Amino acid sequence: MKTRMNPEDIFRIVDKYDGRHGAIISILEDIQAEYHFLPREALKIVASRTGRSLVDICALATFYRSFSLEPRGRHMVSVCMGTACHVRKSPDVLKDFEQHLGVRAGETTGDKEFSLSTVNCLGACALGPVTVIDGEYYRNVKKGDVASILEHACRAENILKMTDDERIFAVSVSCPNCNRSLMTHEHLMDGYPMVRVTASFRRKHGWVRLSSLYGDYRIESEYDIPRGAVVHFFCPSCHAELRSGRLCADCDAPMIVLLVRGGGTVQFCSRRGCKEHMLDLVGEETTGS
Ligand code: FES
């Protein structure tokens, strides 16, 4: 973990996105991955290099709980306290983490090794209780597992490695109305086929491609979709709207639903910039193609 901010790192990260619209969140995520928090000087560089106001950048950095303006520990431990995990005794798991680490949720150990936090849902309810450490998912965690999980995390070993990517996994999806595949093998992101849909917002209608990596919010679109816009998504084959009937727990926008190959559904919020999403797998099958 880097402790001193190096402007060259920030230049490199910003330039990687080549001035793309909607890349600010990705830039902040990359900086956070490098330093485990967002140094204030880094935010100033992002503002000046992207031409965005520092106020806008700070608003984003403080809006999302995954970002931190304060230094965090080398290992990030997030215990899910969402409903599905809560009923499977995640409060006991949290208590055990607190005892082992000697800190409360929201705090960092004195040696800066671990930061402990809670999250409301990690979108993998079927695997609950879920804890994520440094991006690795630990499923069906029980109170007595905590010591060995921390040991594993320190040795960078995984109980559940979901893909070779180590942090995220790809899903292959189809339309819930006509069941036709929404995957496009002509357009890849990080080597994985993207999800192709059509979308309309504010009287504009065009194509949108979504990353198929679960938990990855990058998109490509015919029109720039401003942050905060609620988008209507449609199947490009049967033109049915892909609404799930649920509203986002965070912002009340409609949730979008897609069928996952192998069984289950993935849902995500239709508001650009909102990170609410959930995965409900049948048989827990995921695919990398
Ligand atoms: S409630 Fe824990 S992953 Fe959804």
Image: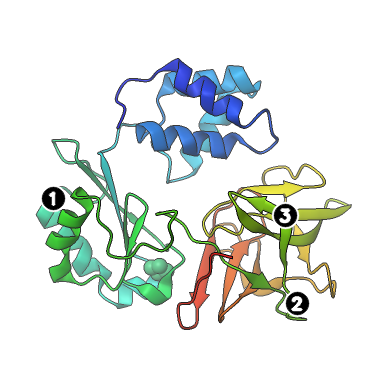
Q: Which residue is mark 2?
A: 180
Q: Give the residue drawn at x 29%, y 37%.
A: 72
Q: Mark 1: which amino acid?
A: Leu
Q: Nearer the viewer, residue 175 or 256?
A: 175
Q: Mark 2: which amino acid?
A: Arg
Task: Give the spatial CA distance, label 1 vs label 2.
Answer: 48 Å
- Residue 22: percent from left, percent from top: 66, 38
Ligand 1 is found in which quarter of the picture?
Answer: bottom left
Residue 214 appears left or right of 243: left
- The answer to whether any part of residue 69 appears in the image is no
Q: Which residue is mark 1?
A: 101
Is the shortest distance between ligand 1 and the CB of mark 2 under 8 Å?
Answer: no
Placement of 89 over or under 253, stated as above or below: below
Residue 119 appears left or right of 7: left
Q: Nearer the viewer, residue 250 or 180?
A: 180
Q: Dot 2 surroundings within 10 Å: few (below 14), some, or many (20 or more)?
A: some
- Residue 134: percent from left, percent from top: 32, 49
Task: Give the spatial CA distance, label 3 vs label 1.
Answer: 42 Å
Q: Which residue is mark 3?
A: 209
Q: Dot 1 surroundings within 10 Å: few (below 14), some, or many (20 or more)?
A: some
